[in-house]
Amino acid sequence: MFAIEVQTVFTATHALRLVGGGVEPSHAHDFQVTVRIVAERLDALQTVVDFHAVEKVLDGIVAPWRGRHLNEIEPFISEVNPSAERIAERIGRLMLAPLETFEGEASRGLRLAEVRVTEAASCLAIWSPV
């Protein structure tokens, strides 16, 4: 098994909606995102997948969130709380379709293994599609 990780950072504010009503105070984080992609076999270039292709997809996902208040952006406006866990899940779900377009995805066992979102030095959330 082979794996790569691609990382990015985006700064945004959020405020979790609390159980029973109310919202915590809005606050900012430098959200650090790490996407881990695995493959059973390497491609023709002997890579899992081109780092730059993954960076492009990941940057396209988080670009609309940079410098924004996540509570004002779908899917976090109403039902989905903008927690680190849900941010990781959203990024992961948006990564799935583009991964299917990479060369030899199915035959090589290429898949998204996990997405990690760190909102503070000791606070890490992980989402995995399995």
Image: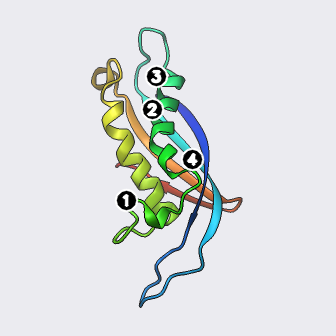
Q: Mark 2 — residue?
A: 38
The correct choice, above or below, for 9 with respect to 69 in the image is: above
Q: Earlier in the sequence, mark 2 or mark 4?
A: 4
Q: Kindly state the secondary structure of the residue where label 4 is placed.
A: strand
Badge nearest the viewer, 3 or 4 = 4
Instruction: Give the Cα distance between marks 2 and 1.
Output: 29 Å
Question: Which dot, 1 or 4, sits closer to the camera?
Answer: 1
Farthest-out residue, right: 121
Which residue bears the numbered disc 4?
33
- The type of residue carrying mark 4 is Val
Relative to residue 65, is residue 90 drawn left or right? left
Identified by mark 3, the residue type is: Val
Q: Nearer the viewer, residue 102 or 71?
A: 71
Residue at image mark 1: 74
Whole-number angstrom distance, CA of label 1 to CA of label 4: 19 Å
Specify the amino acid type for callout 2.
Val
Per the rendering, the mark at residue 49 is: 3
Residue type at the position of mark 1:
Glu
Callout in the foreground (1, 3): 1
Label 2, label 3: how far apart the Cα atoms are: 9 Å
The mark nearer the N terminus, 2 or 1, is 2
Image depth: mark 2 or mark 1 in front:
1
Residue at 52% from the left image edge and 62% from the top image edge: 84
